[in-house]
Amino acid sequence: MLLFVQYPKCSTCRKAKIWLDEHNLEYESKHIVEDNPTAEELRKWWEISDLPLKRFFNTSGMKYRELKLKDKLPEMSEDEQFDLLATDGMLVKRPIIVSEDTVLVGFKVKEWEEKLL
């Protein structure tokens, strides 16, 4: 069973949900704002993903810009970055798909096809 971490008002998340449903993939949906991932969850997902930690930040979001994170992130430790992400789901890039051995951040059809089908 997949964990689908998403924000229902996000158009990319809605497209990803349609894609999951069209491919009959079973998933548990988690609302990223109402049930924000913890720093521990985010760290685990990051370790599985092999992605740079910055990819977990919603760099196009208003909150990211308000906090001027573009300039602050390079100076922050990993622990500080995880703690910050855990404070507000709007800081986290979405959607996120989590399985036992795969974590996908953002919706890229080709990548999802390769990893999930």
Image (cartoon, rainbow, N blue to C red):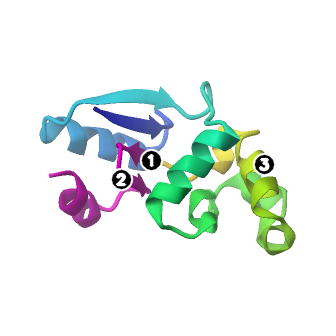
Taking the magenta stretch, the answer to whether it contains residue 112 is yes
Please state if 96 lies on the left or on the right of 25 as rendered. right
Q: Are marks 2 and 1 in contact (CB under 8 Å)?
A: no
Q: Position of residue 13 (x, y in %)?
A: 40, 44
In the image, which disc is placed on residue 96? 1
Circle 1: element type: strand
Residue at the (79%, 68%) spot, across then down: 73
From the image, tell me which residue sits under label 2.
102
Which of the two residues, 114 or 34, is positioned nearer the viewer here? 114
Residue 89 at x, y = what percent? 65, 39
Percent position of residue 71, x then y: 83, 74
Circle 3 residue? 84
Query: Nearest the camera: 52 or 8?
Result: 52
- Which three-letter amino acid code belongs to the residue tagged 2? Thr
Residue 104 appears left or right of 52: left
Q: Secondary structure at mark 3?
A: helix
Q: Secondary structure at mark 2?
A: loop
| Magenta highlight range | 96-117
Left or right: 64 in relation to 72: left
3D distance between C-alphas at marks 2 and 1: 10 Å
Mark 1–mark 3 CB contact (< 8 Å): no
Which of the two discs, 3 and 2, labels the residue nearer the N terminus?
3
